Amino acid sequence: MIVYPAIDLRHGRVVRLKYGDPALETVHGDDPVAVAERWRAAGATWLHVINLDGALGEATLALDALRAIAAVGLPVQFGGGLRALDDAARALDAGATRVILGTLAVQQPESARQAVERFGAEAVAVALDARGERVATHGWQQVSAWTPAELGARFAQMGVIHALYTDVSRDGDLSGVNVEATAELARATGLAVIASGGVASLDDVRRLRETGVVAGVVIGKALYTGTFALEEALRIAREG
């Protein structure tokens, strides 16, 4: 199981939001590259980078920041504000290894198939972020008619492999990851599901790994607040 330390970018800084609410922002650093280097030194094999400015509708792709972070030398999973496949192409050209399609894929599901055909399945992930039982879009500010399982199954039929699942109600509050819903989504769709939102303890990491079906976990606030060390999470993810 891959551990993805999160680097969320807003106005050039590394921040964390609570429940995806831009009014509930905590700044954890002014130098995203230094943070990326910190996670690399701790043993990270991937980075999870989200452009919150783009996710929240501001007209920026944060490509300069992406280039600088990618230069640290770790593969980068990048999302936020990719509203067209050409945006995804620009992100990949700027150094992303994998792009996350959220609002675009939910509003235009066929774009997921087109992305797989254009970039390859390993370079694409879809975001199945849930507010209640429905997939949320536009930086989690709007809710679609789809359930994560319904939309995930449709994407799987299109050749999508990777999915990011976030329980928005838990994001950034250290209340514990939704292990059951994450594993259920993986089993129902066959997607390689990456858990996100609410990771509070090493036990969360252990429980996700023990499901045997969760492909990865994104960890943000717990690392930035020192609840546990990335090295510890990586060790548990490798066990078994």
Image (cartoon, rainbow, N blue to C red):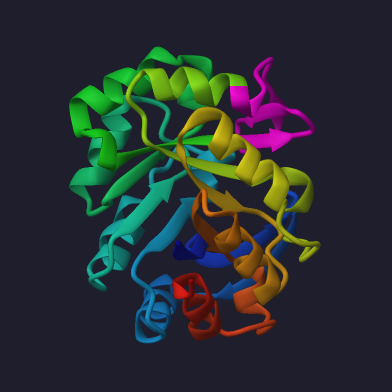
Count of numbered circles in the view: 0
Indicate whether 77 appears above or below 231: above
Return the residue nearer the eye: 65 or 123.
123
Residue 240's place in the image compared with 134, above or below, is below
User: Is residue 147 shown left or right of residue 124?
Assistant: right
Q: Position of residue 23 (x, y in %)?
A: 76, 52
Residue 176: image location, x then y, percent? 76, 61
Tell me the quarter of the image containing the N terminus: bottom left
Q: Nearer the viewer, residue 150 or 82?
A: 150
- Identify the residue at image location x=28%, y=44%: 91
Residue occupying image coordinates x 24% and y 44%:
92
Q: Is residue 58 left or right of residue 206?
A: left
Residue 138 within the magenta-colored segment of the rendering: yes
User: Percent from the top left, x then y, of residue 222?
Assistant: 66, 73
Q: Residue 65, image x and y in percent? A: 35, 60
Residue beneath the point at 68% across and 80% down: 225
Q: Is residue 57 visible?
A: no
| Res 25 seen here | yes
* Magenta-highlighted residues: 128-149
